[in-house]
Image (tube, grey):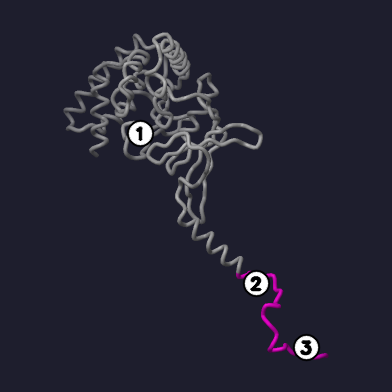
């Protein structure tokens, strides 16, 4: 049997063509890329003209290779309830963007951000043009809003919660990303709320009695059975709630309304009782201080 050839000790290691040995330049590039990805922040998960930025939640414009103009919402906390509600609304006669998809953006070994991709609805924010409008133009806008509210009132479910009987964002908790529901009916939702107000058993017993009477009174003048789609103020906290919810949540829970917007909402939204407004305030105080 012939002996294997002796290896020349002076032969350069650079001539080793073993494909399993990584090229030093490739290794360096991989290390550099890994380091960059590990330091990457969620605002860098997508690029494009910025349409909106609120406390780090960015909405960017993107044009596809086919010319379609999309909006990409980038955040660390965007959950799937918001796009589900938006798409439901868009497919039920409401002027909301159709959602193309929701994607997790992963950098290295961690989820960097969540991106919601939807249609880019043309137009400008109402806040930028309202004060410069005449009464006739404002009347036209109000009529359009009434039509949208009517379409939302037509979307009803027998439960309180999100699309497909999913949980929804806790509308009373404006500082944290907490959730609640779904609830079988309004009474169950009120019981959940009662568990969050401050005070002892007597306070809760008093409000349980008041709310029972308030629900009975409302049955005589509400426009239909079931819980309606809310979301005219914020799709992130939308869901199927009782008819009073849009007004109560807008008047009590939204603390950043422009002065001109409040009278418009009071004119357009279905009203609710002062008792319900007071109770909504108590629930929010209890949640915030818990």
> Marks 1 and 2, Cα distance to the nearest angstrom?
54 Å
Point 34% across, 20% down: residue:
261
Give the vertical position of 128 relative to 150 (above or below): below
**In magenta stretch: residue 277:** no
Q: Nearer the viewer, residue 211 or 17?
A: 17
The numbered dot on residue 6 is none
Determine crowd level at label 2: few under 14, some 14-19, many 20+ residues with C-alpha closer than 10 A: few
Label 2: state its secondary structure: loop
Instruction: Work out which quarter of the rendered image holds the C terminus and state it.
Output: top left
Q: Residues within 10 Å of mark 3 (few under 14, many from 20)?
A: few
| Image location (x, y in percent) of residue 115 | 50, 40
Contact flag, marks 3 and 1 (Cβ < 8 Å): no
Task: Please tell me which residue lies in front, 80 or 48.
Answer: 48
Dot placed on the residue nearer the N-terminal end, 1 or 2 = 2
Image side of residue 251 versus residue 32, left or right? left
Q: Earlier in the sequence, mark 3 or mark 1?
A: 3
Among numbered discs 3 and 2, the one appearing first in the sequence: 3
The percent position of residue 158, horizontal first and vertical second, equals 43, 22
Write the start and end of the magenta stretch as one range.
1-24
Between circles 3 and 1, the one closer to the viewer is 3
Residue 24 placement: quadrant: bottom right
Placement of 242 over or under 112, stated as above or below? above
Residue designated by label 3: 4
* 262 on left or right of 236: left
Label 3 element class: loop
**Residue corresponding to mark 1:** 170
In the image, which is nearer the foreground, mark 1 or mark 2? 2
Residue at 61%, 67% in the rendered image: 25
Is the residue marked by circle 1 packed among few (<14), some (14-19), or many (20+) residues within 10 Å? some
**Image quadrant for the N terminus?**
bottom right
The number of callouts visible is 3
Which residue does the numbered mark 2 point to in the structure image? 21
């Amino acid at each position: 049997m012939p002996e294997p050839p002796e290896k020349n000790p002076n032969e350069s290691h650079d001539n080793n063509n073993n494909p399993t040995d990584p090229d030093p330049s490739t290794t360096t590039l991989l290390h550099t890329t890994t380091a960059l990805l590990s330091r990457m922040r969620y605002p860098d998960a997508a690029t494009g003209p910025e349409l909106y930025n609120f406390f780090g939640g960015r909405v960017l414009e993107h044009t596809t290779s086919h010319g379609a103009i999309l909006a990409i919402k980038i955040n660390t906390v965007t959950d799937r309830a918001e796009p589900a509600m938006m798409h439901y609304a868009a497919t039920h006669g409401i002027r909301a963007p159709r959602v193309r998809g929701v994607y997790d953006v992963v950098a290295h070994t961690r989820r960097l951000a969540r991106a919601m991709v939807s249609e880019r609805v043309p137009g400008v924010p109402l806040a930028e043009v309202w004060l410069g409008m005449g009464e006739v133009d404002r009347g036209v806008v109000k009529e359009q809003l009434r039509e949208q509210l009517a379409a939302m009132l037509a979307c009803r479910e027998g439960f309180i919660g999100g699309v497909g009987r999913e949980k929804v964002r806790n509308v009373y908790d404006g500082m944290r990303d907490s959730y609640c529901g779904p609830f079988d009916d309004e009474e169950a939702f009120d019981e959940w709320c009662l568990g969050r107000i401050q005070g002892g058993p007597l306070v809760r017993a008093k409000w349980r009695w008041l709310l029972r009477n308030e629900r009975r009174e409302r049955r005589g003048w509400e426009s239909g059975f079931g819980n309606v789609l809310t979301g005219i103020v914020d799709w992130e906290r939308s869901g199927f709630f009782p008819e009073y919810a849009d007004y109560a949540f807008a008047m009590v829970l939204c603390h950043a309304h422009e002065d001109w917007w409040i009278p418009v909402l009071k004119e357009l939204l279905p009203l609710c009782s002062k008792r319900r407004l007071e109770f909504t305030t108590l629930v929010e105080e209890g949640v915030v201080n818990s």
